Image: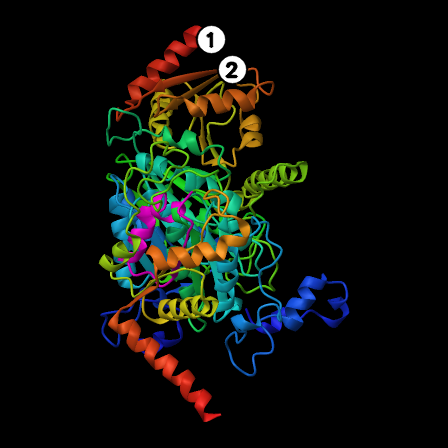
Amino acid sequence: MANVKGAAVNRTAVDEGKPADWIPGTERQTVVDPMEMFHKLPREKQFITGSEAARESMRRANIDIAIAYPITPQSESMQQAGYLYDEGYIKEYYRAEEEIGTFSAISGASRAGVRSLTATSGPGLMRGMEAISSWPGARTPIIMLNMCRVINTPLAIQPDNIEMSFMLNTGMILLHAENQQDFYDYPLAAIMASEQVDVTLPACVSTDGFFVTHARGPVLITPEEFKLPPRDGWRSAVPAMDNENPPARISRDAPIQKSNFISYHMHSSWQQEVFAAVHRSAKYFRKYLGGLIEVVNPGAEEFIIASGCAVSQAREAVRQEGEQGRTVGLIKIKTIRPFPIAEIVEAIQGVKRILVPEFNQAGWLHKELCAVLYGKSTAVIKDGPRVYGGMTMPTEMVLEALADFRKEVP
Amino acid sequence: MSLENLYPSPVFKDYLPIEYRDLVEHGPYTNRGGKDKQTVKVTDMGKFKEVIEEHPMCAGCAMTLFIRLVYIGMPNPEHTIVVGTAGCGRLAISQASVPFIYGNYGDTNAVASGLKRGLEIRFPNQKKDVVVMAGDGGLIDIGFQGLMHSWFRKEKFVTIMLDNEVYGNTGGQESGMTNHGKVLKMAPRGKFGDKVDALGLAKVAEVDYICRLAPTNPARVARTVRRAIMVAREVGHSYIQAYTSCNIEYSIPTPDVMKDAFEIEKERYGFEEIISPRAKEYLDEIEKKAKKKKSDK
């Protein structure tokens, strides 16, 4: 070890090439209770990009290992993670061969019981989907940042969040950040929720690429000398693969491949438990994020329900409607999984019209809302406006959609 | 794992399965004569409780013998994690009292990369050995990219290829390690290309310890595994390629499985050990120490 203070600290190659008196960044930080970090510490306003917000979040997240493969627009965030590794805020880091390798390696790291971070973007996420969909069943807490990008042919690098629809039923925790501020706050909350014993699941924080990752916005950040508590590899719903338990002739990732009713039952109950754990994570997000949804103008007759960047566009539409003397409500959905059914049902009591704007072709949020609100609300739920392939969503589009909706459903 | 964890509370002992009690009393974890490593010998097989047993492999399978020898060769099974993938081998590997990660198809060397690095962060004062043990298809076909890059990155774990030269578990399809011209399922006109020169690739990647062998000399297999693990602990990557015939798909009569292993070894497989200078220096050092200790007694 290169310096005395760091001698007792778990480190690998992090101090290679550093001067003898170098102290890794993480050793200069003090651990604080997550609730103190999220709600009590003073915050300083910075005008930074989403990728920079992610970097500041990672700096305070007490990450042990970060592994990723470059892809636009995610590259910048993981380069930032590289700088944090160089500064000693992340203990281990490497650029993997591609996404199957990335997501497999990060699952290996999480199985070792350490806090593990990766990031990706549309096509990369799809490439590694087999590995990703195996994370929840392996009960591996992993934090994945996803900067949404078109996945369909013709090839494009533009923002579009259709890939989120592919993750809805994986058993992962899934958050959708509206802006740079969320991209700072949500990863920290997601890490703490995902590592709770009654959760022990991977979490993905998605945001809309470029609109958030490359644009600057005001972000209130906590002092960098404070960090989250480390992951405790001993506290988990399943043991880490560290061979620190009495031997038993089982593998944690049991090959339940026999064709008999016992194996079918085992597999189904394992899946049930994964999805129950997603549900159980809700209570932590209520604490950490102050709720699974944000409601603007409660009690309004018509509502917009949105997630991600569409919320920002809807906010502006709501403001402009207000200037015209019309009160339009807005529900921002922070957690896509767990999906906040009860909160939404409560917020839309008596509502006549619900408009669901989205940045994707499939309209996955609209479909989700129609499914979960069936029989629970008399409101008409309309999809639109929907933009994709990199298109922006001018506020005028939202205002026009609202006007048309009022004519259709007076 | 502290070996203290192995011993059950006396009040529970009688309620544990006989297999577990045997493992505690007659397994490789105990009776080490004060050494911190496994001291059981291959020649003692049958006289001690192995960490693997009651596997569902085919009768006469050479791969099973090889896998048993691998576990005997592990210096510290109590600090070893095995990573595998779909294939015949995992049917036996998952029966061992060593944690086994049964991952997705072809993900072994990527999983092992993250696992090993994670364990090094979490246990800075305790070496944890990571061993990938997977079939030829799992490594050279679907897992090729992960295999190569783990070699290029010089990840500190061991890769063991169970080379039965066929996809045995899925019913006998040709693999990248099948020999040219061999007629198998999905090669109705004979295997088109040559057997992949995995050893040559390992040399190009400058893998620190490389060995190709057949399970003809059990003591040599255990020694090879021990060497590979020790190199991976301290120096760099290790690769073992073992001929583990599939007597079903290659129609080898069960009583002739070992005869086939001797013949194939003699005809084409051979024994080859390639050790980098730095790995050799390290092995010389630890093996000399061990010899010296023996002569001191």
Query: Within the image, what quadrant is residue A14 found in?
Result: bottom left
Query: Within the image, what quadrant is residue A404 found in?
Result: top left
**In the rendered structure, which segment of residues is drawn in magenta?**
B137-166
Q: Which residue is mark 2?
A: A352
Chain for numbered disc 2: A
Is label 1 in a helix, a strand or a loop?
A: loop
Residue A264 point in image, percent of width and height: 63, 36
Q: Amino acid at mark 1?
A: Val
Chain for numbered disc 1: A
Q: Amino acid at mark 2?
A: Lys
Give the class, few, some or many, for how many residues have Cα within 10 Å of label 1's Cα (few <14, many ≥20). Answer: few
Residue A144 seen in the current view: yes
Q: Are marks 2 and 1 in contact (CB under 8 Å)?
A: yes
Residue A30 point in image, percent of width and height: 41, 65
Query: Within the image, what quadrant is residue A234 found in?
Result: bottom right
Q: Residue furthest bottom?
A: B296
Residue A130 point in image, percent of width and height: 42, 38
Q: Which residue is mark 1?
A: A409
